[in-house]
Amino acid sequence: MITHAHFSLLVSLLVTLISGATAPAAIVDIRAHGAKPDGTTLCTTSIQSAIDQVAEDGGGTVHFAPGTWLTGTLRLKSHVTLQLDAGCVLLGSTNPADYPEHRPATRSYTDNYVCQSLLTGEKLANIAIRGRGTIDGNGAAFHWKEYVNRPYLIRLAACRDVLVEGVHLRNSAMWMQHYLACDYVRIQNVTVWNHVSYNNDGLDIDGCRHVVISGCRLDSDDDALCFKSTLGRACEDITVANCVLSSHCNAIKMGTESNGGFRNIAISNCAISSPRYSKSAYGTQAGLAGIALETVDGGHLDGVTLSNITIRGVKVPIFMRLGNRARPFTKGMPKPDVGTFRHVSLSNIVATGAAPIGCSLTGLPDHPIEDVSLSDISLTFAGGGTAQQAERAVPELATNYPESGMFGVLPAYGFYCRHAEGLVLRNVRLRAARPDLRPAVVLDDVTNAVIDGLNAAGNPDSRAVVRLVHARGALLRGCRLTQPAGIFLEIEGTRSRDIFMTGNDVHDAAQLAVFNVAAPKESLTQVANRIPGE
């Protein structure tokens, strides 16, 4: 039974609908503005007209039906969604003249790169690119190393409330996506294939805040998922989850540009591999690094966690670097001071098929990386390291471009760590596919380190399983050998002190410890270990 109250409510709703107060946002089909889906007619003007109309009407959706729509640069507008249906291909023109230059008012080091884009916008709010369609940059037509006239596929600067969802992004002439100084960005269920030109990154988050990335597949020649801060603004408050990443360079990278730094970033549940179906533009088929965390331009890397990551067939699974390239991001600026690298946690990482290089975690003299924790890590390397490589002196290379192979083959087949404070290696398992004469772990100029539950392969002819050089305040606990070794622990350097071993099972080593290069024997205390001969 309809009461008087119900009847009054129905009348009120009808009046509201008739008045248009809840009218849906506009949906404009680009064909209504003259666009033709034949792949040969340039539709830039028609599509831009549709975008402008929707913006003028207060916001809504620009609809792309199935077909191939050829276009040059499109300028996005606030409160406008581009909806690409399945079967739609938004195809970039091969004529550089169809991409007018636009240098954002937001100054950054990327001013030195290309200033052209297929889709672009600055200081916009509430914009979206979504659907099951494809955006193809036609980047093979721009195959030259110079940046000029090689447009990005998507470039947004100083925008807020950005959504990119579901679309397939292919064949950019430059980075696929560049989000510069944007806030509240969501990128979800996006597929990227970028293997047709140079600098073919998959996704670049540059000085952005409040970013959520999930369910993406990024397959790129250059870095796949890359965090940058090419201006004095940090990448911060970011989560990444459930992504599949392939790169001939670095799968997950922070840097190289790092002026503003990286803060409060969590990455989880990702699968990493080298690309299977492409040939590298730079000549290296296997990925350079699975995880590369770098700050070299004065920025602060602080509060970064990575967990539940699998890595297959990549040369270096883990690379961390605090350097001093000290590059200003605009002309006339003074060089920045050395940055900081602290409060980083990597857990539940499994890597197989790594190269013989080894992993490195390196700071600089008087500028250590701090409070880095590696736990529940299982890494398998190619092995084959020689006694000569175990003796190598590793150069500092403070000002060099940071890359996972920058030091050459390291004097440890697993982890080489130098200039660090508060380093923790917990439940780390290291294997070499071939016999290797290098230590599994080398700690050089490291203070207050913990090696807890190391499970490593030794070698009767190797120098040692663990080598400590000028180590102060090291704890080794619960370590075990998976293969017999000649020496478990080597201590070197006059500054070595306060090294404590307890609860280790190293009976398969011929010797528990040796002291070299004036290392004081009183630097080591060992209690309750299962030692050689027991």
Image (cartoon, rainbow, N blue to C red):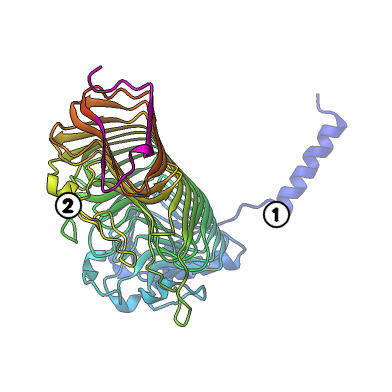
Location of residue 463 in the rendering, given as x and y in whole percent from the top left corner: 18, 39
Disc 1 or disc 2, which is closer to the eye?
A: 2
x, y percent for residue 482: 23, 25
Quarter residue 352 falls in: top left
What span is in magenta? 512-534
Work out whether residue 241 can be spotted.
Answer: no
- Does residue 82 appear left or right of residue 142 in this picture? right
Is 205 or 458 nearer to us in this picture?
A: 458
Q: In this figure, which residue is indicated by the disc labeled 2?
A: 285
The question of residue 533 being in magenta is answered with yes
Kind of element beneath mark 1: loop
Residue 43 can be seen, yes or no: yes
- Residue 481 lies, with reference to residue 107, above or below; the image says above
The residue pinned by badge 1 equals 20
Q: CA distance from mark 1 to mark 2?
A: 59 Å
Q: Which image quarter is the N terminus in?
A: top right
Q: Residue at x 60, y 65 (%)?
A: 57
